[in-house]
Image (spheres, rainbow, N blue to C red):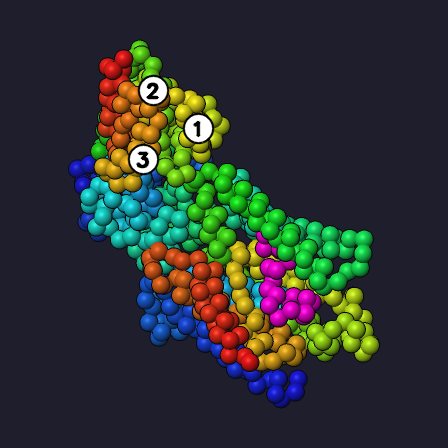
Amino acid sequence: MLNSFLLPAALSLSLLAMGQSMPAAAKVCVTDDTGANVCLEQPARRIAALSPGATELVWAAGAGDQVVAVVSFSDYPEEARKVVSVGSHTRVDLERLMQLRPDLVIGWVTGNPPEQIEALKDLGLPVFSIEPRSFEDVSHTIERLATLAGTDDVGFAEAERFRKGIAAVERRYRDAEPVSVFYQVWDKPLMTVNDEHLIGKVINLCGGVNVFGELERLVPRISSEAVIGANPEAILAGGMGQENRHWLTRWEAFPSLDATAKNNLYFIPPSLIQRPTPRMLEGSRLFCEKLDDARAKR
Amino acid sequence: MSRPLAMPLCILALASVAAMVVSVGTGSVSVPPGDVIAVILGDGSSLQQTLVLELRLPRTLSAFATGGLLAVAGALMQVLLRNPLADPYVLGLSGGAAVGALLAMLAGLGGLIVSGSAFAGALLATLMVFGLAHGTGSWTPSRLLLTGVVVASGWGAVITLMLAISPVQRLPGMLYWLMGDVSYARSPSPGLALLFLVCILVVPLGRSLNVLARGPMQAAALGVSVRPLEWTIYVLASLLTATAVTMAGSILVVPHMLRLVLGNDQRLILPACALGGGALLVLADTLARIVIAPEQLPVGVITALLGVPTFLYLLYRSR
């Protein structure tokens, strides 16, 4: 880990190793997604990530070794499964969390209960709350996490890799033929995303046109009729588990649907696209390939 | 207070203290009993101090206040409606509170605003039922009950509608609120103060309440001014329930069982409810914290699971 620090951080850490106190120069400050300024006197050594997405982002920032607490469903990367769980993101076991003596908590603006985040702040813990809503947000979040964890080398490189990867996909599909797309984020009730949602942005990135992109709600609940009425050229769905296509079978009953007639019903592993993490790059490439496949069938 | 009344209250007071000791001493992180005492005496490690004084104690006190308030409110409602099955929510007050709280959550607000909004909703529900039940005719408990039940199902419909249209990521918080959850409670002192005040206020009314429970005619014949007393009970019970719901969402705490065990003397039942309801919720919340730790259960689940069978058993056994 040491070689991955910026010079001042590395210097201060080696001073610490020699039993001397940390110089004030190591202090870092970043602004979180609620607009709050989060300052640490020294890089975070014991990080608690209160959402599966936050866990992935901390690992992406190069600070996986510093994670001491996660919440349930933190299944990526593999090492994250070994970290102590402190409950679910909707209800955190504050006792167990405090016992792990974190020096930085990564909150989730819309996922964690505001009361519990407030309680943690009252207990004197620095809370960095995140809510990535765009590809750039993903990169920027990784960079800020790296700054807080003192892992700028790894984090900024990863953020840049993601940024460049997305830009390359964007260049490649900028002039692609539009494909009308329905993305099914949940089955019962039937739910999709609008253009503001990160998945909606993947659709646009690949030259797709989200048939429900204009709806006002981020994750609208819709009827099968609305899908049939919109008659998308391709239907892409996640599902529960990694290889579970059965959400798509409901559309096979409607041969009049363009997507069904041309067999443009595609499964996308939800973990690649439904979490705002660098894995979205892989998910986006896969998504774009599916739309290319649909174009090839014209 | 006469002797036969004091005895059960002493037992309940001891039980309450015991419940609180168990609650403060129990959690997903083990703190040895000796260390708990050390912490309370101002000693112990800083982690133990945080766990016991800042996480457990406020929650335990909140649970006690909430349970006590709800049980007293329920007991008052039973007298008002002259129905031993009444609970604090029978007149739709929790529905109004829930709509208020969910509206605030829907707007992405948290903490104090959710509590304030819940309180406003509860008071609105109270006024609505009160006004509607008054109507053009006379004001009777059965009319009040029917109005309350209908208004409650109206709130239920609004709640369902709000859940159906809420953003997915807000649903867990809303559902936990509806199930009742003491982990929302931040400062126990207003609830505790109100509980204490009400006990002092209500006990002198006990004799009149006893008479009222036998029917308004008899009460009037015996010199009780029935209407003002009924209004006082209604306003008081609503205020207690609103405060409790504001602290911890809709939790069902049944005062029925105490009434079945202790008989029907309001002078005894009301303070007994304050203690018994408080102790029950403290224990239920302790269970909610540890049953599937580190995951947390909403305490409302536990009170319902404990309360319903107990109530049915007592009901079945009595005659």
Above or below residue B56? Residue A113 is above
Q: Residue at x 67, y 57 (%)?
A: B146
* Residue corresponding to mark 1: A225
Picture disc at residue A247: 3
Whether labels 1 and 2 belong to a single chain: the reply is: yes
Which residue type does callout 3 highlight?
Trp
Looking at the rendering, in which quadrant would you find the N terminus of chain A?
top left
Magenta highlight on residue B83: yes
Q: What crowding class fits label 3: few (fewer than 14 Cα within 10 Å), some (14-19), or many (20 or more)?
A: many
Which residue type does callout 2 highlight?
Asp
Which of the 4 image quadrants contains residue A8?
top left
Q: Which residues are magenta?
A: B77-95
Which of the 4 image quadrants contains residue B235?
bottom right
- Secondary structure of the residue carrying tag 1 is helix
N-terminal of the pair, mark 3 or mark 1, is 1
Check if mark 3's residue and mark 1's residue have beta carbons within 8 Å.
Answer: no
Q: Residue at x 22, y 32 (%)?
A: A153
Q: Chain of mark 2?
A: A
Check if mark 1's residue and mark 2's residue have beta carbons within 8 Å.
Answer: no
Q: Residue at x 57, y 46 (%)?
A: B157
N-terminal of the pair, mark 3 or mark 2, is 3
* Residue corresponding to mark 2: A258
Q: Chain of mark 1?
A: A
Task: Judge from the rendering whether residue B258 lies leftward or rightward of residue B129; answer left or right.
Answer: left
Q: What crowding class fits label 1: few (fewer than 14 Cα within 10 Å), some (14-19), or many (20 or more)?
A: few
Looking at the rendering, in which quadrant would you find the C terminus of chain A?
top left
Magenta highlight on residue B301: no
Q: What crowding class fits label 2: few (fewer than 14 Cα within 10 Å), some (14-19), or many (20 or more)?
A: some
Whether labels 3 and 1 belong to a single chain: the reply is: yes
